[in-house]
Image (cartoon, rainbow, N blue to C red):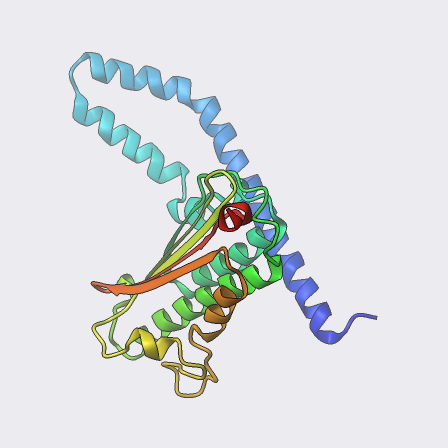
Amino acid sequence: MLSHTQQKELLQEKQELEEYSSYLDQNEDDLRRFKHDYQNILNSLKIDAQEGNVKGVIDKLSEYTNSHFNEEALRKYKDLNHIHIKELKSIVFSKLTQMYNLGILYGFGCESEIYEIPQNIDLLDLVRVIGITFDNAIEAETDYFNSNFLQKQDLRIEAMYYQDHDDFEFMIRNRIPNSDITLSQLTEKGYTTKKQHPGLGLANVKQFSQKYDNVIIDYHIKDTWFIFNLTILPIDEVID
């Protein structure tokens, strides 16, 4: 018999999958309508272009795009179809949904088709680290907004997966205000910017990098961004 926590997790996963399925169906309908309409649109634009009415072409394209496509919805789960590892897709899906619901602007990219990661890596370890860094970024944006350091439109998180041959890379960055927080503080166990949060900072992430010889982690503050990079090299490259 499943525990209450397991039942709750299964229900959440079911709801997320239903939402993702609905998103895909909606976009498929939008693309089908576009395919049906585009020939008439092109003919209309062709006449304007032949007459030298460039502004008319631009205005019509803009009008059609605004009336037929929801930009926010289109970016909500962008590039998730390129991730073929269920666990890596699920963690990003849940965090993108969370940011979308919180009203945090975000961008996620995964141009590579990702089918596997270096075999010596425990996938659950990797998912945990990705989840921690997303949570840190979301908490930071929410905390800074509540403290009036950032305006709502300034909240932003950007993340990406990337793979070249047999490696795997993950990057995430979030906006931060000018502050006195140091990188050494962020890696201290128990450190947090929230007063009533136990906080692990990046201490668990550091433990992950120490567990695997083929993991490279780099994080730094640049301008108004905290940037985190994780690279997993093929294990044979480290042995060689």
Residue 225 visible, this angle = no
In this rendering, the answer to whether 195 lies above or below 25 is below
In this rendering, the answer to whether 139 lies above or below 92 is below
Q: Residue at x 52, y 28 (%)?
A: 32
Q: Residue at x 24, y 24 (%)?
A: 57
Quarter containing the N terminus: bottom right
How many numbered marks appear? Answer: 0
Q: Residue furthest bottom?
A: 196
**Left or right of 163 in this view: 185:** left
Residue 24 visible, this angle = yes
In the foreground, 101 or 111: 111
Q: Residue 231: x percent and y percent? A: 44, 53
Q: Residue at x 35, y 69 (%)?
A: 141
Q: Residue at x 54, y 46 (%)?
A: 236
Q: Residue 140: x percent and y percent? A: 36, 72
Q: Residue furthest top?
A: 50
**Left or right of 58 in this view: 185:** right
In the foreground, 154 or 61: 154
